[in-house]
Amino acid sequence: MVYLPTVLFSLGEGAVIPLIPVIAANMGADVASAALVAAALVVGQLCGNLPAGWAVARIGERFTMVVAGIISMVAVVGMVLAPVIAVFAASVFLLGFCAAAFGLARHAFMTTRVPLPFRARALSLLGGSFRLGVFIGPFVTAVLLQVFGDEHAAIWFFLGCLVVMVLLVLLGPDPEKTNPVVLASSPLAEDSGEAVSGSIPTYERAGIFVTMWRFRGVLGRLGLAAASLSAVRSARQVVLPLWGVSLGLDAQTIALVVGVSGAIDFALFYASGQVMDRFGRLWAAMPAMVLMGAGFLALSFTHDGDSAVLWFGMLAAVLGVGNGLSSGILLTLGADVAPKTNPAPFLGSWRTLTDAGGAVAPLLVSGVTAVASLSAAAAVMGVVGFVGALGFIRWIPRFSPRRDRRD
């Protein structure tokens, strides 16, 4: 009941995402317009985080997931029946909006109910559940295209996943009732000066913007470091395919290299949680950022060399390792610094900031490539990775996993 709804949603979404620009192009969009339609999913997710935080705080995680699932069904039907490209783009935006609500609801649930000694592993599994769907989804799409020969078959598959998910959440046992709230859920509890007992009802009444202002310090410091991690992750998905194209590789080779990188990424998702729970958050975040920063910087010097293709494959694997080691870090850090009694408004702000980093990165890569070169863009993202690593070293909360396990 905790992980299966996430797998169902991400599996359907992963099957649809690769086809969004294809369907847009078939509806008459040019390349730029098709890319804009695909970006509507990210924009919708970015816009949906703050309203999702409000909804979870008011009606709870379970009903937020149900409402998001039902509205997602409307969006999916709109994608199938859209008569013009504008309606299709609006449906994609609505789908991203609902994905934000779904993700935040599950994040808030895990924040309040998973004990600290194994929080990172639980949230890494949650991150792995999302990655599983995104990893398997394209293969499901390939099978559906082979059988039905119609891009809309994947959208209907997503609709089926949504129906099963909503029924599961509605009819299955409610995890909110079977899993009690763990009040001492923050590693910062000992250092937060919580002697003022009146702070608990104040947090419960605080809205989105009040919460953003109250936690502006942590959002402006640790939140920006987390946004840099999201930016480097997003840049990897853009730079690797473009790098293969710039080397003159065919589509199959590029897909193989990107696929191997993604497989390494997925294989390591649980290792990140193990490291964070046993040694602390920093020992997963810093190596991940250093690996990805070094991978991008090294890649920027290999484009014109004699072994450019070999370096491309090797450094794509390095980026996959770094990204895999970062699985669950953003979820875990958000849970660590969120208020204990009503985390949803804070998590809405946190996820908006991290999603913004992921949304800005492709624009940064595009702009630097247009002004200078793709190699320069890779170098810039490498610098972002190292700056983010320094931010994590400075601002990640320090706590002892062994001490908290005894407590």
Image (cartoon, helix red, strand yellow):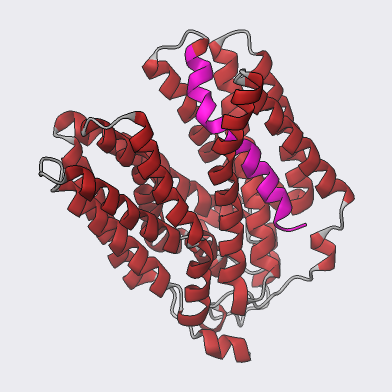
Instruction: State which quarter of the image contains the C terminus.
Output: bottom right
Q: Residue furthest right?
A: 171
Q: Position of residue 316 (x, y in %)?
A: 31, 50
Q: Residue at x 51, y 61 (%)?
A: 269
Q: Position of residue 342 (x, y in %)?
A: 67, 62
> Magenta region's main secondary structure?
helix
Q: Position of residue 25 (x, y in %)?
A: 47, 14
Q: On the rendered structure, is 173 left or right of 52?
A: right
Residue 24 part of the magenta segment: yes
The answer to whether residue 48 of the structure is visible from this angle is yes
Instruction: State which quarter of the image contains the N terminus.
Output: bottom right
- Look at the picture and state if 201 lies above or below 67: below
Query: Which quadrant holds residue 44?
Result: top right
Residues rendered magenta in the picture? 1-25
Query: Which quadrant holds residue 148?
Result: top right
Q: Residue at x 73, y 31 (%)?
A: 159
Q: On the rendered structure, is 230 left or right of 161?
A: left
Q: On the rendered structure, is 286 left or right of 173?
A: left
The answer to whether residue 388 of the structure is visible from this angle is no
